[in-house]
Structures are given as structure tokens and as C-alpha cells.
Image: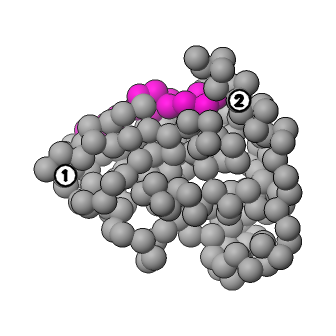
């Protein structure tokens, strides 16, 4: 099954069409939903536990995570895949709207299959087309990297964690949170 996901990714990446510069010019701020979506939780706090998440090509382990409402969790995320991946906590609708921004970053050379041009991303910080990708609910990682995010799940929104690199979400690189009340 995992070999099938990798093959699907290779097919998707090879067939990605460039996004027009008009879309890039009119895209607005590269946010991850803060200030314009249902509340998705809060960054930081004192974690009650640590959950290790490993990103492979193109799936997460674990794929489903149970969280208590109001719980603060530290996620230690490792990219064990061969490609750049993202761990992004958000609503399914926000993942759908975030995908085109990630496509633009790919088209502009900020993201390559296995590398991130962080200098090019940082150069956009504060502009109308901010693509710095430094939101507290998201980690963008090269192969072999490990990073952490601490998140408090004080929301009633449906949340998932996903990779919005072009083709990854569509090939199934998403996991679900079961938030108990």
C-alpha cells in the first residue's frame, strides 16, 4: 500500500501544471487560516503529553490521534520520507484553500521535491504575498528533519493534520484528530 502511495505521488508531481502568475499576483497573504477561519486551537501551553509523528512518502504514522478537548500536546514530528513534507493542523476546508498557495511556492522554486528555499520564503515575509510559512500550526520539513509544535485543542471544529505539498494531500497524506469532550 505504501509503495502505491509513493507511485501515486510520482505520477501527481510529474503531471502538475504551472500556476499562472496572475493567480500568484492576486493570491493575498499566505496564511494558514488564522483570523479568517473557525478557531482551530491555540499555539503553546504546558503539554500534558508528547506524541511522536513520523512522515513518510505519503502517509503519517500514526494516521489517527485521539485528543481530549482542551488538551495541550507536544508533537515531535520527523520527516522520514524522501520528499519535503508538511505537518499542518487545520480544518479540511482550510487545507483545501492552502493547497494552491503551496502550489505557488512549488512553482516559484521555494519548495522542490526534496529541498526548501527558506531564504526565498523569508524574503516575502510581511509583504502582501507572504509565503514565509512560519505559522504556529504548521511545520514544513526537508527529509531527515525533526521539529516540534505544541498545540492546545480548545476548539469544536473538525480538525485534521495534513501535508499540502502539491499532490500529497490528494494522494492521502492526511490524518485525523478525534477530539473528545
Q: Does 69 sit above or below residue 11? A: below
Find the distance from the CA under tag 1 to the CA under tag 2: 35 Å
- Please tell me the numbered disc located at residue 8: 2
Mark whose residue sits in front, 1 or 2: 2
What secondary structure do most residues of the magenta stretch adopt?
strand
Name the residue beneath numbered marker 1: 69
Q: Between 71 and 37, which is closer to the camera in this rendering?
A: 37
- Taking the spot 63% from the left edge, 57% from the top edge, the residue there is 99
Q: Between 118 and 161, which is closer to the camera in this rendering?
A: 161
- Taking the spot 19% from the left edge, 55% from the top edge, the residue there is 70
- Helix, strand or loop at label 1? It is loop
- Helix, strand or loop at label 2? It is helix
Determine the residue located farthest toward the left in the rendered image.
181
Q: Is residue 17 left or right of residue 32?
A: right
Q: Does 85 sit above or below residue 44? A: above
Q: Between 9 and 39, which is closer to the camera in this rendering?
A: 9
Q: Is residue 86 left or right of residue 118?
A: left
Of labels 1 and 2, earlier in sequence is 2
Residue 169 location in percent, x, y? 59, 43
Residue 122 location in percent, x, y? 71, 66
Amino acid at each position: 500500500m505504501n509503495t502505491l502511495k509513493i507511485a501515486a505521488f510520482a505520477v501527481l508531481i510529474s503531471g502538475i501544471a504551472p500556476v499562472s502568475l496572475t493567480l500568484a499576483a492576486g493570491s493575498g497573504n499566505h496564511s494558514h487560516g488564522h483570523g479568517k477561519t473557525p478557531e482551530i486551537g491555540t499555539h503553546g501551553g504546558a503539554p500534558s503529553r508528547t506524541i511522536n509523528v513520523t512522515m513518510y512518502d505519503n502517509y503519517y504514522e500514526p494516521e489517527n490521534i485521539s485528543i481530549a478537548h482542551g488538551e495541550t500536546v507536544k508533537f515531535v514530528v520527523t520527516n522520514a520520507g524522501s520528499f519535503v513534507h508538511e505537518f499542518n493542523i487545520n480544518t479540511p476546508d482550510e487545507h483545501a484553500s492552502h493547497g494552491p498557495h503551496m502550489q505557488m511556492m512549488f512553482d516559484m522554486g521555494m519548495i522542490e521535491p526534496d529541498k526548501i528555499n527558506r531564504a526565498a520564503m523569508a524574503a516575502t515575509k510581511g509583504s502582501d504575498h507572504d509565503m514565509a510559512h512560519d505559522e504556529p500550526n504548521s511545520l514544513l520539513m526537508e527529509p531527515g528533519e525533526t521539529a516540534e509544535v505544541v498545540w492546545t485543542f480548545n476548539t469544536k471544529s473538525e480538525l485534521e493534520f495534513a501535508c499540502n505539498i502539491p499532490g500529497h494531500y490528494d494522494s492521502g497524506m492526511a490524518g485525523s484528530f478525534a477530539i473528545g469532550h
